[in-house]
Image (cartoon, rainbow, N blue to C red):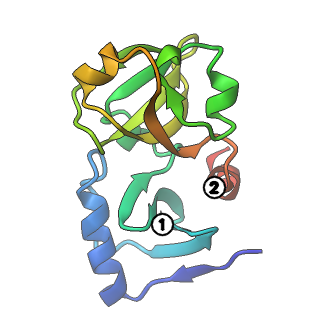
Amino acid sequence: MTVRTILKDRDAKPLVEELNRIPGLGHLSHKSRVETEEVKGSEIVFVDGQPIAFKRDTLMVPVLTNSSALERLPRVTVDMGAVPHVVGGADIMAPGVRKVEGSFGPKELVVVVDEKHGKSLAIGVALYDSVALAATKKGKVITNLHYVSDVIWETIKPAAV
């Protein structure tokens, strides 16, 4: 069982400022209760009991249940054949990409959605900018950081359901 740590104001303030730089999150208050939970090399951040994002190394990534942040990220749609691989943790390969929405550069966050339902499957880091990614026909195009059924999802899912 993992333990959540409630941060003191002086520790929470820089974290809230960092979270507020993520598109869609610019509304968090320094008065919010901020908690963190360590899960296999990542630190999940909860604000007022809601999972907001996780930090891995220096990268702050919104969690898949954070729809306000996901709506503002560029989207990459994959075909249904790619879905079991993506939710199994595989990186996104060019042949599975059906559509690229929004503009982004290499090393920027994108949300990966399925072709049939438009459901968010994963959040990853683009290896190319949006134009080059759409034109790429083979090879890896997105590194998968967080996906449905991973340890972060399993930790936050009870709060999301």
- Which quadrant holds the N terminus? bottom right
Report the Cα–Cα distance between label 2 and label 1.
10 Å
- Three-letter amino acid code at disc 1? Val
State the image coordinates of residue 96 (x, y, percent, origin top left): 53, 16
Residue 27 at x, y = what percent? Answer: 26, 56
Q: Which residue is mark 2?
A: 156
Question: Which residue does the image show at 22% across and 36% down from the upper left?
Answer: 105
Residue at 31% across, 69% down: 16
Comparing 44 with 6, the one in front is: 44
Percent across and percent down for residue 148 are: 64, 40
Of residue 139 and residue 123, the one placed in the foreground of this image is 139
Q: Which mark is residue 45?
A: 1
Position above or below: 72 against 46: above
Secondary structure under the numbered disc 2 in the rendered image: helix
Quick check: can you spot residue 40? yes
Q: Earlier in the sequence, mark 2 or mark 1?
A: 1
> Tags 2 and 1 in contact by the CB under 8 Å rule?
no
